[in-house]
Image (cartoon, rainbow, N blue to C red):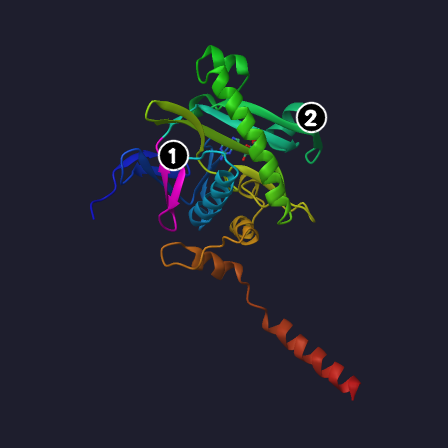
Amino acid sequence: MAPKKPLYEGKAKKLFEGPEPGTLIQHFKDDATAFNNQKKGIINGKGVLNNRISEYLMTRIGEIGIPTHFIRSLNMREQLVKAVNIVPLEVIVRNIAAGSFAKRFGVKEGKVLGHPIIEYCYKNDALGDPFVTEEHVFAFGWATPQELDEIRMYTFRINDFLCGLFMGVGIRLVDFKLEFGRLIEGDREFIVLADEISPDNCRLWDVATGYRLDKDRFRQDMGNVEDAYQEVAKRLGVMPKMDADSYVIEVNARVAKPKPKAKAKAKVAVKKIVKAKKK
Ligand code: 5GP
């Protein structure tokens, strides 16, 4: 088979030319970056997990009538997507104060907001993705008022839907980032959800304990990063099966902590005592 033609390499994904015109192959890497590329690392198995999680969430979102770029999964790390012209905006939705929002407004992390808030950032690494208003979007021609209306409507619906979906598996959707693209089909051009939805671009907190199940574990050196991504996949019921190419075996091996011998011996001793007492 001819090698795939690389088109673009981003911080967490690579894009290759797709097998049919108008398609791309989206490849999920294990690379992780934070603070505008100042912090770099590898989260073993992340690409495999994000591929599955994003596939699942994009499919569910498609089922409620919101168009997405997702076509189908190809393998453990790759999915086939429609080629779109990306709107250069990061659309951030916040349900609970956290991250840069909590800092900017001096509010305590965890404060539930009166209603979900949408913020826009101009997608530009060199400028550090600055926050912008609708006025900037129209003045710079990044999207038309009609396109931004559609993006807002889709974003609120996605937020409602995902809040419920995650709540069903004991996870609070604190905030997340979406990207949209323009899809041209014949003489029609319309807005579709693009990029990915995964613990890389969502804040996900366990409902019962507040435990962080997202990239903040990497950003803030909280440890157990791989376990957190796996936990999200497990709860959504999309945990990938072990695969030679995926590193998931390696991750699982590290996560499975063998019980210390002493602990096992103590358990046997306790059992003996209980038995003796029963007699
Ligand atoms: P904050 O502005 O608090 O840093 O991020 C808000 C939300 O958007 C978080 O869920 C964060 O993961 C996501 N987000 C914002 N900017 C980016 C970005 O450049 N890349 C990724 N992966 N997520 C982002």
| Mark 1 vs 2: CB contact within 8 A | no
Residue at screen point 44% across, 51% down: 45
Q: Give the overall secondary structure of the magenta segment.
A: strand
Q: Which mark is residue 10?
A: 1
| Secondary structure of residue under mark 1 | loop
Task: Give the foreground label among 1 and 2.
Answer: 1
Q: Quadrant of residue 119?
A: top right
Q: Report the disc number at residue 124.
A: none
Picture coordinates of residue 42, whole percent (x, y):
44, 45
Name the residue located 39 percent from the left edge and 58 percent from the top edge.
243
Residue beneath disc 2: 106
Membership of 73 in magenta stretch: yes
Look at the image and tell me in which quarter the C terminus lies: bottom right
As shown in the figure, which amino acid type bears the numbered disc 2? Gly
Residue 108 pos. (x, y %): 71, 32
Q: Residue at x 41, y 55 (%)?
A: 247
Of mark 1 and mark 2, the one earlier in the sequence is: 1
For the question of whether residue 28 can be seen, the reply is no
Q: Is residue 68 highlighted in magenta?
A: no
Q: Tell which of 73 and 262 is nearer to you.
A: 73
Of the pair 180 and 92, the residue shown nearer to us? 180
